[in-house]
Amino acid sequence: MFLLLLVLIPILIVIFWYINYLWHETYLKKYVGPRPLPIFGTALDLRDRKTQIRQFLKYREKFKGDYKLYIGFQPLLMLSEPKSIEAMLSSTTNLKKSKSYTFVKKWLGNGLLLSDGDYWRKHRKIITPAFHFQILDKYVYAFNATSSILVDRLRDKIDQNAFDICPYITLCALDIMCEAAMGTSVNAQMNAESKYVTSVKEIGRIFIERFFSVMQQYEFFYRFTDNYQCEEKAVNILHSYAYNVIDKRKKENENIKSEDDLTSKKKLAFLDLLLFHNSQTNTMTGDELREEVDTLLFEGHDTTSAGMSYTLFNLANHQDVQDKVYQEVESILADNPNREPTCKDLHGMKYLEMVIKESLRLYPPVPMVGRELVEDLRYDDKIVPKGMMVTVDAIGIHHDPNIYPDPYNFDPERFSPENSSGRNPYAFIPFSAGPRNCIGQKFAMLEMKATLTSILRNFRLLPTVPAQNIELQVEAVMKPISVMVRLKKR
């Protein structure tokens, strides 16, 4: 009997997979894609995190547009054409994130990243004022203070051998986000092995492992893995820390009775704005406050650290571009070479912004955006039925030679005003686009500008010899395995 079950169960699983495949093919037959293997689909092609992005780009080049994949039993429609991406991201109803995002739900709950419908709209409306231009100016202190610690740590690398700058940037970005989001310091740059820092790393690792694991996608099987225990431990640490900070911040803000009292604070955190709004309206529970703070931290620190790392790689390997950025920074801060840049100064660094944008085009930290359709998606002559999982292929469209000639070449001039004019706005989507775009994209751009400015004012970045090719890996975001540079004092 046992031997019979051993034979029958795999056969039944294969039959079930094939029936599932045939059913989905009734509406996916218009799309091309790699031939899936029974049970695994195309998951085996994508099992190596170090080659996943390269494989996705190969698919895009081979199929010349939108295409389909199967990850185990789950079909994915990959949207990598301007028309289909615009139809998806501009929709005011298809705002629901795909099921893969639920892999961080234990940590983030119903924060802005994972919620949808009226709940999402309510919270988006509450949070949007925290990223108003006047409020962004209040965050610059965190950018400058944390960047100065980074610069001090990098001084030991002057005139030394090439080293990987990524860990330095990652910890700096985490410090910035904790300071700006919660008004507290986790001192990640000086204590990289703290429980909080290692817990954040663990959550990112587990997220991507679950996404590309046929078995761990299912909660029943996931509960029997080591990752489940690791996640439970990490989430408890992160939640405890956040709740303690919220309680502390509430007590510190007891005397704030008006918006003027709030904005007069020299150091203002995202949490302060949420607490003040809640004191006036009582619309968010303690859990909801924690979820939104954690969400900002999760979405903010890894994406910006990856973006800065890619930009540093490009600056080190293109000395002419680095010189031009440095000249722009020096001209803006010429009145006092020792003063820290203001929000206005950072906005004025237009060429640096072009360099950052071109780096984000080549290497978008969020290379794909997943959605679950709540209503049919229609574009051209195609109808994608509700319930389907679709993925916006940002890195694919960023490398479309019809939009970006010689797409693998680094050229900041692509983002000059004259060259950007007339380009489809859905052809450059490092922060997504449409009603569910990244709410903190202006914050992120200022953070990257401030940190990169601090580095460039103190050091000349030099490439490795011979020059390094960048290798990518997918965790919670797409990040470089390493960025090897050398430093010379300015």
Image (cartoon, helix red, strand yellow):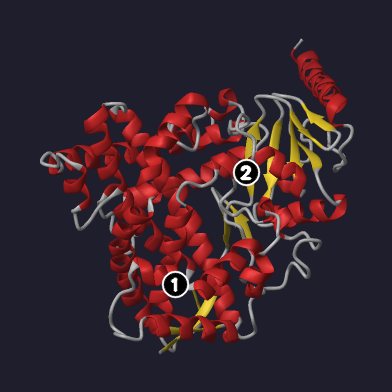
Which residue is depicted at the point 47% across and 32% down? 105
- Disc 2 designates what residue? 369
Question: In the rendered image of this protein, does residue 205 appear above or below residue 118?
Answer: below
Label 1 element class: loop
- Eye-nearest disc, 2 or 1: 1
Q: Is residue 394 visible?
A: yes
Query: What is the spatial separation of the Cα atoms under label 2 and label 1, in whole angstroms?
Result: 30 Å
Please report the residue visible at 86 percent of the width from the left and 38 percent of the height from the top.
31
Residue 137 or residue 243, whichever sits in front: 137
Q: Residue furthest left?
A: 255
Across and down, in percent, residue 133 comes to: 38, 55
Q: Residue at x 89, y 35 (%)?
A: 30
Q: Is residue 96 above or below residue 474?
A: above
Amino acid carrying label 2: it is Val
Residue 93 position within the rendered picture, expressed as x and y whole percent measured from the top left: 61, 29
**Mark on residue 348?**
1
Above or below, 102 relative to 201: above
Mark 1 neighbour density, 10 Å: few (under 14) some (14–19) many (20 or more): some
Residue 20, x across and y down, in percent: 80, 22
Let me know if residue 483 appears in the view.
no
The image quadrant of residue 33 is top right
**Disc nearer the start of the sequence (2/1):** 1
Image point 86% across, 49% down: which residue? 63
Q: Quadrant of residue 238?
A: top left
- Mark 2 is surrounded, within 10 Å at the Cα level, by few (under 14), some (14 to 19) or many (20 or more) other residues, namely many
Residue type, numbered disc 1 = Gly
